[in-house]
Image: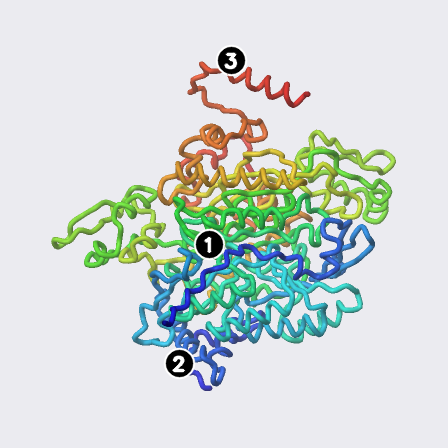
Amino acid sequence: MALKHETPLLDQLESGPWPSFVTGLKRLAESEGKQYAPMMQDLLGQLEYSYKTRKGFWKGGTVGVRGYGGGVIPRFSEVADKYPESSEFHTLRVQPPAGMHYDTKTLRTLCDIWEEHGSGLIAFHGQSGDIMFQGATTESTQAAFDALNEIGFDLGGAGAAVRTSMSCVGGARCEQSCFNEQKAHRMMINATLDDMHRPSLPYKFKFKFSGCANDCVNASHRSDFAVLGTWRDDIKVDQDKFKQYIAERGRKEINDQVVNMCPTRALSINDDDTLDVDNKSCVKCMHCINVLTKALSPGDDKGVTILMGGKRTLKIGDLMGSVIVPFKKLETEEDFEELVELGEACIEFFAENALEHERIGEMIERIGLVNFLEGVGLEVDPNMISHPRTSSYVRTDGWDEEVAKWEARKGVAAE
Amino acid sequence: MSQAQAPRMPDECGVPDPLPLMHPVMRENFGKWDWHDRPRPGVLHHVAKSGDEIWTVKAGTQRQMDVYTVRKLCDIADEYGDGHVRFTARSNIEFMVDSEAKVQPLIDKLMDEGFPVGGTGNSISMISHTQGWLHCDIPGTDASGVVKALMDELYQEFLREEMPNRVKITTSCCQINCGGQGDIAINVQHTKPPIINHDLVANMCERPAVVARCPVAAIRPAMVAGKPTLEVDEKKCICCGACYPPCPPMQINDPVNSKLAIWVGGKHSSTRTKPTFHKLVVAGLPNNAPRWPEVAAVVKKILKAYKEDGRPWERMSEWIDRIGWPRFFEMTGLPFTKYHIEDWRGGRSALNTSGHVHF
């Protein structure tokens, strides 16, 4: 089938070595006899029109599936008079398997469903981690969802809701994994599906799960509730393999690339070419383990650090997540249940205390970390700060009581 | 009497369990891996404590894929791999195989079919991006097109591992910045206040919510030609576009005045240094579809300086931290202006409050 619209600008994105999405769009538009071809013909037309005018022409609206209040991103064309077949081009956000693992049978089934009910265009994956099935009409949205739901896939989040989450490859393939990322991801999200499918929070709320400080799913900044793997005993060192690295790469390289790059100066090479680790100073940043994968590995007493409040620009500016739980074991079922309970408590506090369109990081900025901690029942800890306050504008008339609490907590910890 | 069939209600099944979909070697050795290495760019080799091994071949995709492309990737996985794949956070696809002998034929087939093998270690990986003109309701530019154009330019650096450390590039079509932090971030930066269609505001916008959305309190209720609407104090306006999503008649996108800016030094990981935000280095680049050559030229300038001068394992932010900003601007040949100096809340912490000066 010939293309209905000329696309001289988009055509320029078909040359060059990187895989071209334009070639893919054209393949769909040129698919003789397929129900989606006319839609994709006009979609190409509208996209070319955007390239020419340098403007976008989609507007939102209200489209959903029965029983849910979110998960579909409605798109109606503002230039439907020119491109009528793609006047409706909605996206279904669908949650992928945790860790984004697929077998080919599942991927082929997803393709078949989308070929029957949608545009044939799928993005693996969106920035929140959804499979984005892009290009459904209002009429076909329900049937597409039903077919996906029948094979065990569920819609993700959109709007003022718990959003689709991401977890790294983790224990499935990585020796640096410090907890079962996929289990934590599934337990947390599956416990909060009501807040995903029926958006009623002040604004979005994202969880992300990374197995270590390398943070391969960018949890620290890109989620409201970031779970990072860590450990609290000593780094494990295989001294024979460390000596072998020195023999192969030389002392200077190991000094330059490992010892001197340790952020807390916790490493040095002994005279016999073994590694000396000051474990009390180590912050589990992963660098030395990343470089010397055969000689070094995380310790045995593993768990997670939880950071809260990461977000991008709007409204008050960028925020990194900051520590709200320095360490939590995550091994037994009870451990995982406690993590979920904390997540739920944070969502509840957020729902009750945040302003409209305010992220939890912004709320904490507004009310102060201490008020948030007291609200969800967490104790203050020096791991939550870069340094104590520098401003003397503070009332300290409750000092003695707070000291007593600290001593009591220390007493409990020592028992 | 016939009875209407009850409508199907959703099965709120949530996040699918990945275990049944995983390569059997990964399933069997879950949480019991020992070490890994990278035999060549684009290939990871993991060894489990049991002695089992798995090889991963990583390839770039266009992210927005037609079903024919997805099926082709499945065909490759079935014929040359073991039928199991996963996707990374940056939309690369990973094929897992249980023997080293399968690696080279898989690489050859992928390259042959136009899927570049690379993106591991100290390479430039796929650019994380958004929807743009293809699907977003508020985009200042396209996403997939910018990425395609840039990855064509950076193709060789995806295939190789020759940078000081990994390079994460992101693009965003507005200041909501869905692309996120990056070693290099390419983001739309509007330069003019919104143009308001006063006929439509009252009907389309929840005005108090729009007023509340403005970061600098520049929006206020107004009457124009007898109609309730909103007006913008253009002296206060920072052209961020935050008012546009809740109020489409406040059009912020402009074919000429919506520019692109480049930011450097963002880092998500806590590896070595704490995570960092990216910093503005260039603004005012034209939104020049379909290939954005002016953007590519600046990105390549920055990458060239980093590649030549960065030490092994230094991310962009760590490299700049060592050499200092004066040298960054000198080495890249980029101009330093008054717009680089932070004036947002807490901005004083971005000033040099020491005697440390680079000469």
Q: Are marks 3 and 1 on the same chain?
A: yes
Q: Earlier in the sequence, mark 3 or mark 1?
A: 1
Q: Nearer the viewer, residue A171 or B234?
A: A171
Q: Nearer the viewer, residue A279 or A89?
A: A89
Callout 2 and callout 3 share a chain: yes
Host chain of mark 1? A
Q: Position of residue B252 (x, y in %)?
A: 32, 56
* Residue at image mark 3: A400
Q: Is residue B328 visible?
A: no
Look at discs 2 and 3 and give the one toward the viewer. Answer: 3
Amino acid carrying label 1: it is Gly
Query: Residue under circle 2?
Result: A5
Of all chains, the one bearing label 2 is: A
Label 3 Cα neighbours within 10 Å, binned few <14 / some 14-19 / many ≥20: few
**Left or right: A412 in relation to A311:** right
Q: Which labelled disc corresponds to residue B329?
A: none
Residue B171 visible in the current orientation: yes
Identify the mark nearer the N-term, 2 or 1. 2
The residue under label 1 is A157
Q: Secondary structure at mark 3?
A: helix
Binning the other alpha carbons within 10 Å of mark 2 as few (below 14), some (14 to 19) or many (20 upward) gives some
| Secondary element type, mark 2 | loop
Q: Say above or below: A404 vs A267.
A: above
| Separation of residues labelled 2 and 3 (CA atoms) | 76 Å
Label 1: how many residues lie within 10 Å, few (<14), some (14-19) or many (20+)? Answer: many
Judge left or right: residue A191 versus residue A135: right
Question: Seen from this angle, which residue lies furthest left?
Answer: B226
Residue positioned 39% across, 76% down in the render: A42
Q: Residue A104 is drawn in which quadrant?
A: bottom right
